[in-house]
Amino acid sequence: MVLSALAMLTVSQSGFTPLFNGRNLDGWTAKIAGYEAGDNFADTFRVQDGKIVVSYYGYGGDFKNRFGHLFYKEEFSAYILRLEYRFVGTQCPGGPGWAYKNSGIMFHGQSPQSMGKDQALPVSAEFQFLGADDGQKRASGKL
């Protein structure tokens, strides 16, 4: 998944405040199942051409349920998210079928530091993105 133009708006603000600077992942913490918070195993999350790119290609062809999440440094209670996303590439070998072109924005969840080392998913609410192949229809935007 590629994320760009990630921004938020709190109720008390008059404009959008960027959460992503377009250059690096300063202010963000990676948490990948099987690794401690902050260990961005295999460069899963990186910045390319001003976008956050999520890639499992460095996993050596064996996914092993190493789901990854990226957490922002601040907590918010009232906000509007505005972002662009798209799916590129192919499914990671060994990735579960239900996770094919499956991503999302998890919010109102636990911190990466409170997750267990082997915990695959944070406890949270998620706005889900589901990609489709040519000729295929998949509902997206599930909550």
Image (tube, rainbow, N blue to C red):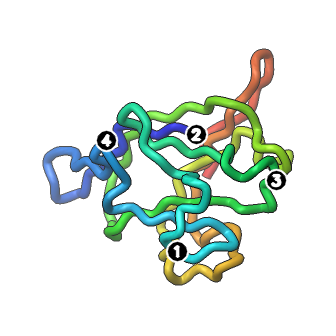
Which mark is nearer the camera, 3 or 4?
A: 3
Which mark is nearer the camera, 2 or 1?
A: 1
**Location of residue 39 with respect to 90 vertically, above or below:** below
Mark 1 lies on a secondary structure that is loop
Q: Mark 1 and mark 2 in contact (Cβ < 8 Å)?
A: no
First in sequence: mark 4 or mark 1?
4
Residue 1: image tag? 2
The residue positioned 50% from the left and 80% from the top of the image is 113
Q: Which residue is mark 4?
A: 22
- Density class for disc 4 (Cα within 10 Å; few <14, some 14-19, many ≥20) is some
Mark 4 lies on a secondary structure that is loop
**Location of residue 65 with respect to 123 vertically, above or below:** above
First in sequence: mark 4 or mark 2?
2
- Density class for disc 3 (Cα within 10 Å; few <14, some 14-19, many ≥20) is some
Q: Amino acid at mark 3?
A: Asp
Q: Which residue is mark 1?
A: 37
- Density class for disc 1 (Cα within 10 Å; few <14, some 14-19, many ≥20) is many
**Location of residue 112 with respect to 140 vertically, above or below:** below
Q: Is residue 38 left or right of residue 56?
A: left
Task: State the separation of the CA atoms marked 4 and 2.
Answer: 16 Å
Task: State the separation of the CA atoms marked 2 and 1.
Answer: 20 Å
Instruction: Please identify the quarter of the rendering in which residue 42 is found.
Output: bottom right
The residue positioned 85% from the left and 45% from the top of the image is 97
